[in-house]
Image: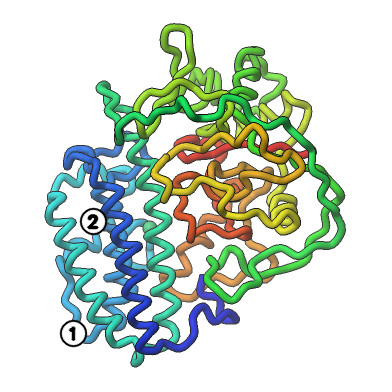
Amino acid sequence: MLPDSTALLSAPTASASTSWLTRYHAVRHQSVALCQPLLPEDTVVQPMLDVSPPKWHLAHMSWFFETFLLREYLPGYTLFHPEYAYLFNSYYNSLGSRVNRADRGTISRPPLADVYAYRAYVDEHMAQLLATADTLPPAFAEVFELGLQHEQQHQELLATDIKYILSTSPLAPAYLPAIDQATSHEAAPPVAWLPVPGGVQRIGYEGTGFCFDNEQAPHDTYITDFELQNRLVTNGEFLEFIEAGAYADFRYWLGEGWDLVQREGWQAPLYWVQKEGQWHRFTHHGLQPVNPAAPVTHVSFYEADAYANWRGHRLPTEQEWEIAARHFQPETADGTFLESGLYDPQPLAPDADPTQCHQLLGDAWEWTYSAYHAYPGYQRTAGALGEYNGKFMVNQLVLRGGSCATPESHIRLTYRNFFHADKRWQFTGIRLAR
Ligand SMILES: [Fe+2]
């Protein structure tokens, strides 16, 4: 994000103004569309710390445009409401005090209707601002692009937070009507190990488009030859791990993971429940039977690592993942993204070529065995936006590749997502290396 050395967008022109506005409306519309199936009551609750209420997301995304663009670049702009910065600032210490993250579910007022009015107000003023694109400095283009990418990040969070919120209701309501899975594949293509050449290789973002600051700076890294599995680990393969009693066998687990499994009583991935002797999963389409051919998801790093140990293999490092991805050059058409409306990783066709690497982009984020820290040459952006990524570079693991809840235009081979090792509410999956 905002590296000084990278021109994210060229100087604005009248046509750029029109295309920026079109893109702005498309991205903003996607957020509202995601919330359409919800009742107002669904948008207020916060059943755990990591999950923010959808109403809060809708307001916070608007606060971002208001704070970093309208206040900075639109002369005479008047805030929609003077208290909204306190309510909807997420974590920017540079911007003052705010509601504690754990208390977002207590924000019963303003009502949802006011939050939609706030969005409309921000959209109206963003349209005014974008109409003056030819007078805006280059720095505007960079922050504008960041605002769109930020909104897309929150769209993924909306999809996963909505799932968690509905799953905690005793009524277990479906977000969307159940889909017919009869045509879904019930067998995955066989596992194959694909060789990846080692040596000194380049990683980090080198293009001329947008990237986050944590993908900077591109640099050389050394890896040894290794092999990567051709696809994600499936539910059926993970079920073998469960049925072998591995959740109850300390030998496969990191100490912290074993303690957590004991404390929480974990016996399967998040959302898995047994019903009449069969494993089911809570999904956006309600409770569904586990499809053995689909990628396993909603596993923590600890479960991913224990599974790899049980198989006698390991997780890739993030360097290995990116070098393999550059080597295999996956097509986004291969993956499932937010726009599919499926909200679930999809099974590969059983006859998918096992010599090709599948599902690198989309479907499920892949846990790597790499700590999330700064690349050599990383420079934190000056000002409040320097808090966007840099301050989280401790005690988290990197995940790669995007998921079925990631907007397709948001993902890159160099994209570095990060979560703490115990997190399971995102669409997190497993790919093995050796
Ligand atoms: Fe945010």
Q: Residue at x 44, y 86 (%)?
A: 138
Q: In which image quadrant can residue 14 be found?
A: bottom left
Ligand 1 resides in the quarter of the picture at: bottom left
What is the x, y in percent for residue 219? 73, 68
Instruction: Work out which quarter of the rendered image holds the C terminus and state it.
Output: top right
| Element on which disc 1 rests | loop
| Element on which disc 2 rests | helix
Q: Which residue is mark 1?
A: 76
What is the x, y in percent for residue 285? 35, 31
**Which amino acid type corresponds to the residue marked 2 in the rendered image?**
Leu
> In this view of the protein, which residue sits in the foreground, 343 or 190?
190
> In this view of the protein, which residue sits in the foreground, 178 or 312?
178
> In this view of the protein, which residue sits in the foreground, 335 or 371?
335
Q: Residue at x 18, y 39 (%)?
A: 39
Residue lying at the far bottom of the rendered structure: 135
Q: Which residue is mark 2?
A: 87
301 vs 399: above or below = above
Q: Which mark is residue 332?
A: none
What colour scheme does the image use?
rainbow
Q: Please tell me which of labels 1 and 2 falls first in the chain.
A: 1
Give neighbour class at mark 2: few <14, some 14-19, many 20+ (Cα, 10 Å).
many
Q: CA distance from mark 1 to mark 2?
A: 23 Å
> In this view of the protein, which residue sits in the foreground, 72 or 242?
242
Determine if residue 290 is in view. Answer: yes
What is the x, y in percent for residue 424? 49, 35
**Which amino acid type corresponds to the residue marked 1 in the rendered image?**
Gly
Give neighbour class at mark 1: few <14, some 14-19, many 20+ (Cα, 10 Å).
few
**Mark 2 vs ligand 1: CB below 8 Å:** no
